[in-house]
């Protein structure tokens, strides 16, 4: 038995010595004059911190890494919104042929989010996995296929527990004219764990002329709420000068099926799209234009413009007095973004500053707003 434990200890130390440790850390400060993205215009300052530590084992044809990532978002004014997250993940990368033209990338992990006070409704745990297969059809053409899933479990909102699946394919092409083209298609679906139920009654209650005994029939109808969505993306990149590039992207997404899950409150039922506002809530076209300029001293500037039309599937539009305006909420979201980044590669340090100006035009006046957000971030990679 002592021999077995000694052997196990030897192999543990051996693997620890040949493993390559890594450490990444971010700290950022952001000023946002509309953190809720609505007409109330609530201002706050958010300080965020992140650490990512792990080990990497390298072999000739594959790599395995394990990592822990922890983060905090601290709100200066509305401190109850402060939240924490933790994630453990394992990654596996392998070349499937001698030439290295076909590569497999897989990962699996568990993450959790912890909130404060009334925001503990958002506390949840996610089990996730991802498989990506990359194949070089030629030096200038790459085909990728991807499958991703996540199992989401809420601590205090069990009715919103769900499973999400996503399948995607992508072609990447490059040309001698220094032009790149990306074509991407995705199919995603979100399935809630519990059913919706609706109760209806029919028949007579035994009152009125000619009525006999009361006879009521109760019907209970159940359904499994879910949403499925397809999306397609085209991105074209072009090098203009030696250190200047421009890219244009267009993406359209549409729901094939949409059945919402509702949260009961004193204000009435609130649909999931209001609580989470994820991409499954709306259809629409997103276009973006990005200019990238590489500067001296290992620095870079990006200017980005994007506009998205969001046609919500299950949300109505109201004025500020809660009068119904339209049966369909429709937003047009325009974002102007400026980014500056400088790397100090010799010490593994980078600094990034961003400014976003957001205009959201909506037929629901509560969500008709303007937003300014500024952030500076310091990153360390060892």
Image (cartoon, rainbow, N blue to C red):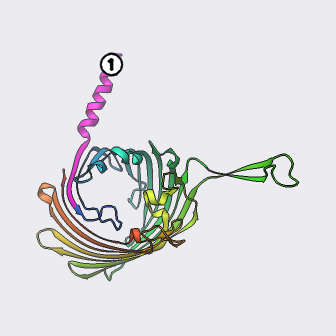
Question: Label 1 crowding class (10 Å Cα cut-off): few <14, some 14-19, many 20+?
Answer: few
Residue 322 in percent (x, y) is at 47, 67
Residue at 23% from the left image edge and 37% from the top image edge:
17
127 relative to 226 in the view: left or right: left
Residue 79 place in picture, x, y as percent = 26, 49
Left or right: where does residue 171 sit relative to residue 82?
Answer: right
Give the residue furthest to the front. 209
Q: Measuring from the top left, give residue 349's x and y in whole percent.
A: 15, 57
Q: Is 8 covered by the magenta stretch? A: yes
- SS assignment at label 1: helix
Magenta highlight on residue 55: no
Question: Residue 149: where, in percent of width, then height?
Answer: 48, 52
Q: Is residue 99 above or below residue 288?
A: above
Give the tally of numbered discs.
1
307 or 250, which is in the foreground? 307
Q: Quadrant of the N terminus?
A: top left
In the rendered image, the residue lying farthest to the right is 210
Residue at (20% x, 56% y) in the render = 28
The boundaries of the magenta stretch are 1-30
The answer, for residue 114, to whether it is visible in the render is no
Residue holding disc 1? 3
Q: Is residue 22 left or right of residue 215?
A: left
- The reply to whether residue 375 is in sight is yes
Question: Looking at the image, which is closer to me, 275 or 212?
Answer: 212
């Amino acid at each position: 038995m002592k021999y077995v434990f000694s052997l196990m200890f030897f192999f543990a130390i051996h693997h620890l010595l040949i493993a390559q440790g890594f450490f990444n850390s971010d700290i950022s400060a952001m000023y946002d004059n509309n953190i809720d993205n609505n007409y109330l215009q609530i201002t706050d300052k958010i300080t965020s911190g992140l650490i990512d530590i792990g080990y990497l084992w390298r072999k000739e044809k594959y790599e395995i890494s394990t990592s822990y990532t922890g983060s905090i978002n601290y709100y200066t004014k509305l401190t109850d919104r402060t939240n924490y997250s933790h994630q453990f993940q394992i990654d596996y990368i392998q070349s499937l042929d001698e030439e290295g033209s076909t590569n497999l990338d897989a990962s699996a992990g568990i993450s959790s989010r912890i909130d404060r006070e009334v925001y503990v409704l958002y506390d949840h745990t996610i089990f996730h996995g991802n498989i990506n297969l990359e194949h070089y059809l030629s030096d200038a053409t790459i085909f990728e296929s991807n499958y991703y899933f996540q199992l989401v479990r809420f601590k205090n909102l069990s009715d919103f527990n769900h499973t999400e699946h996503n399948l995607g394919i992508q072609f990447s092409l490059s040309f001698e004219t220094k032009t790149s083209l990306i074509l991407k298609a995705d199919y995603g679906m979100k399935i809630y764990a519990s059913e919706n139920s609706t109760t209806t009654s029919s028949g007579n209650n035994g009152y009125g002329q000619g009525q006999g005994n009361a006879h009521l029939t109760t019907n209970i109808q159940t359904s499994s709420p879910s949403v499925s969505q397809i999306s397609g993306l085209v991105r074209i990149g072009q090098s203009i000068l030696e250190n200047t590039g421009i890219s244009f992207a267009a993406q359209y997404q549409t729901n094939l099926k949409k059945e919402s899950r509702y949260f009961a409150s004193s204000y009435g039922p609130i649909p999931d799209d209001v609580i989470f506002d994820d991409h499954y809530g709306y259809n629409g076209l997103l276009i973006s234009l990005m200019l990238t300029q590489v500067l001296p001293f290992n620095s870079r500037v990006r200017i980005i413009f994007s506009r998205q039309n969001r046609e919500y599937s299950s949300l109505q539009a109201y004025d500020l007095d809660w009068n119904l305006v339209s049966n369909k909420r429709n937003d047009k979201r325009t974002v102007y973004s400026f980014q500056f980044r400088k790397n100090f590669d010799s010490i593994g340090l980078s600094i990034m500053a961003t400014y976003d100006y957001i205009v959201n035009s909506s037929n629901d006046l509560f969500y008709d707003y303007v937003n300014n957000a500024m952030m500076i971030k310091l990153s360390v990679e060892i």
